[in-house]
Image: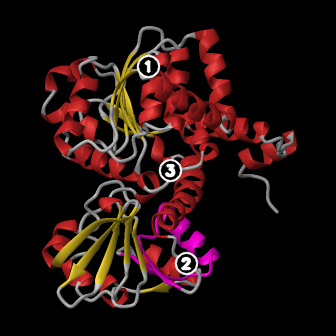
Amino acid sequence: MDSALGQAGERRIGWAARAMPVLTAIGARFAAERPLEGLRIAACLHVTAETAVLMGTLRAGGAEIALAASNPLSTQDDVAAALGEYGVTVHARAGVDRETYYRHIHQALDIAPEIVLDDGCDLVNILHTERTELLDGVRGGCEETTTGVIRLRQMTAEQALRFPVVAVNDTRTKRMFDNRYGTGQSTVDGIMRATNTLLAGKTVVVAGFGYCGRGVAERARGLGARVVVTEIDPVKALDASLQGYDVRSMAAAAPEGDVFVTVTGNRDVIRGEHLAVMKDGAILANAGHFDIEIDVRALDGLAQAVHHGVRPNTDEYVLADGRRLLLLAEGRLVNLTAAEGHPAAVMDMSFSAQALVVAWLARDPVRPPGVYDVPEELDVEVARLKLAAAGIEVDELTGEQERYLRSWRAGS
């Protein structure tokens, strides 16, 4: 390990751990109980300081871990260097090409995992397409993102998924805290770091009004932007409209937007016909998982010149008529590439749920293949631990209230 780099990573991890009291408490419990003793885990996650705290928690429980990056532009090299001190084998380096990215996932799978942790379903996909010899040894897994859960549900519908996977993304705490508040703040943070633009008075187009999209919309509106929402779901579009957002198609929004943020989990949300009518200086950012929401190939095809790095994580595409479009983070996750991702206090809850689910899978792994919800009691436990760490008290039901809720006989 590069000692200076590793020491910098340890400081970064220590800073994150200060804001992660729930995961720290679970780590102390795991160290005493050792519920993961000898368990082999392969993980494909963003290699950040917050992830390092999760890795330390799982190691405290007795697990053997191999970690690959779920996004080559989000890897913090100092954290990767420091993780060796936790006894975690890391296959990740910032800025690697696509071939190396997938090679790292294969190297993580060489551990012959019993449990897998995924962020986007790439690791699970490779298990089912290229490393099928390992499938019989996998007890189960966790998926962290909306994009990954979409892919897993499709695998289940086609009867292709070979082991149970828990959709950590779909817990109430994850959707509310991580997707809405975490994505909202960190996405705006990434856009402002990359461009130093003033959002007040700008028209910000948010594609997708799920939990992540509404978080971005709320934060942009809070900074004084006029927010336009695009959607394919009529119910979500109606919700956005009733919250006061201007709801339009992308074709109608494209000529008006100053900043575009895709948050859908789908591909080609911003296409060539949209790019062709955007105003000079329009900013393009993606907060969905993969770099396919903005059609970067179409952008390349329209450009007469490309100026890379006009600012950190900002590339300028000059079109034939002289208009300039600014692509942030190469179309990858702007919040993890141009900024530092979610605040540690947010990841405290998401990663606490991951840790508890891993212990749950290790304790009782015999389930048919499919996508499973996190047990309600684990989600509630994470919320209670977070409230306790914040010194917040909540009411409890009285005996009479519990009896009332269990009975259908009591009238008004």
Quarter occupied by the N terminus: top left
Q: Badge 2 is on which residue?
A: 199
Label 2 is placed on what type of residue? Answer: Leu
In the shown orientation, is residue 339 left or right of residue 151?
right
Q: Which residues are magenta?
A: 202-231
Q: Which mark is residue 341?
A: 3
Based on the picture, tell me whether residue 220 belongs to the magenta stretch.
yes
Based on the picture, tell me whether residue 174 belongs to the magenta stretch.
no
* SS state under label 2: loop
Q: CA distance from mark 2 to mark 1?
A: 41 Å
In the shown orientation, is residue 106 left or right of residue 214?
left
Instruction: Tell me residue 31's x, y (percent).
Output: 61, 13
Q: Which mark is residue 84?
A: 1
Q: CA distance from mark 1 to mark 3?
A: 22 Å
Mark before the other along the chain sequence, 2 or 1: 1
Label 3 is placed on what type of residue? Answer: Gly
Q: Nearer the viewer, residue 135 or 30?
A: 30
Is 218 placed above or below 384 here?
A: below
Is 231 placed above or below 287 here?
A: below
**Residue 371 appears in the picture as rendered:** yes
Q: Are marks 1 and 3 in contact (CB under 8 Å)?
A: no
Q: Residues within 10 Å of mark 3 (few under 14, many from 20)?
A: many
Quarter occupied by the C terminus: bottom right
What sort of colour scheme is used for the picture?
A: secondary structure
Which quarter of the picture shows residue 393? top right
Mark before the other along the chain sequence, 1 or 3: 1
